[in-house]
Image (cartoon, rainbow, N blue to C red):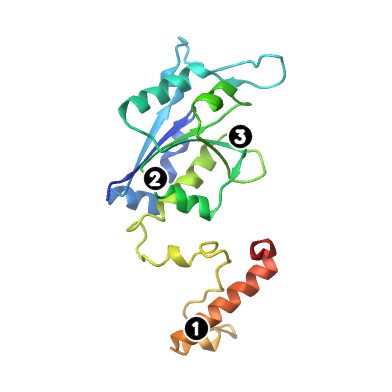
Amino acid sequence: MSAIRFDFLSSLPESFNSVLNTGILRIAQEKELVEFNIHNLHDYSDNKFGHIDDTPYGGGAGMLIKCQPVFDCINKLKDEREYDEIIFVTPEGELFDQSLANELSLKKNIIILSGRYKGIDQRIRDSLITREISVGDFVLSGGELPSLIIADAITRLIPGALGDSESALTDSHMDGLLESPQYTRPAEYDGMKVPEVLTSGNHKLVREWQERKAREKTAKLRPDLLK
């Protein structure tokens, strides 16, 4: 199985290093299951000062990332390989969820563009972007954190990325429900006991309990999922 390749485009490339080199993302790279590449948009600027932004036509507050550095960077990458998706992270995009993470985990080459300032020139979105994704109905200072969220959610679905191959299959949202309550040793702590069914050794009863509790938890916390 070939590795999934991510190419991150950003004006603040240093934002990625600590997260990409920690935990599951680091392990997945060491196992050659995933490849992360970070591209500094300032390196593609045709401005002698490395500027990549300018004021918007029509006035208004804020600055926009210009076409030139983004087009030059993405076109260079596309000359080297074929990409399944070129993603722009934006609050205006489709909401990222587990189903979308599952879908993207089947791709091979993905570009993720992080916005900054007020946004990006619309011509980038019209000509280059294949998918716009949002991680929630709120605004952040830039797209770096959402880009990392997307990459993390996809990477942990790659077979071999997690120590326990079944772990991801029992996560919240994988089957449309929230995960059932979880417990570990000791069986009693400060008078609080683990439900007896979980220590019974009866796997059928345990599964039935987990399914029932997952549905109860979903009905209480996220009833919208049951629809």
Residue at position x 58%, y 83% from top? 190
Q: Does 59 appear above or below 185?
A: above
Residue type beneath disc 3:
Ser
Q: CA distance from mark 1 to mark 2?
A: 35 Å
The earlier-in-sequence mark between 1 and 2 is: 2
Q: CA distance from mark 2 to mark 3?
A: 28 Å
Residue at position x 44%, y 50% from top? 154
Circle 2 SS class: loop
Circle 3 SS class: loop
Give the label, 2 or 3, closer to the camera.
Answer: 2
Spot occupied by residue 99 in the image (x, y as percentages of width and height): 52, 54
Spot occupied by residue 129 in the image (x, y as percentages of width and height): 51, 31
Residue 141 shows which numbered tag?
3
Q: Does 23 appear above or below 143?
A: below
Left or right of 208? Residue 139 is right
Q: Tell me whether the residue at label 1 lies in contact with that at label 3, contact meaning CB atoms closer than 8 angstroms.
A: no
Q: CA distance from mark 1 to mark 3?
A: 45 Å
Give the label, 1 or 2, closer to the camera.
Answer: 2
Spot occupied by residue 82 in the image (x, y as percentages of width and height): 35, 33
Between 41 and 215, the one nearer to me in the picture: 215
Residue type beneath disc 2:
Lys
Left or right of 225? Residue 161 is left
Disc 3: CA contacts within 10 A as few (<14), some (14-19) or many (>=20): few
The residue under label 2 is 107
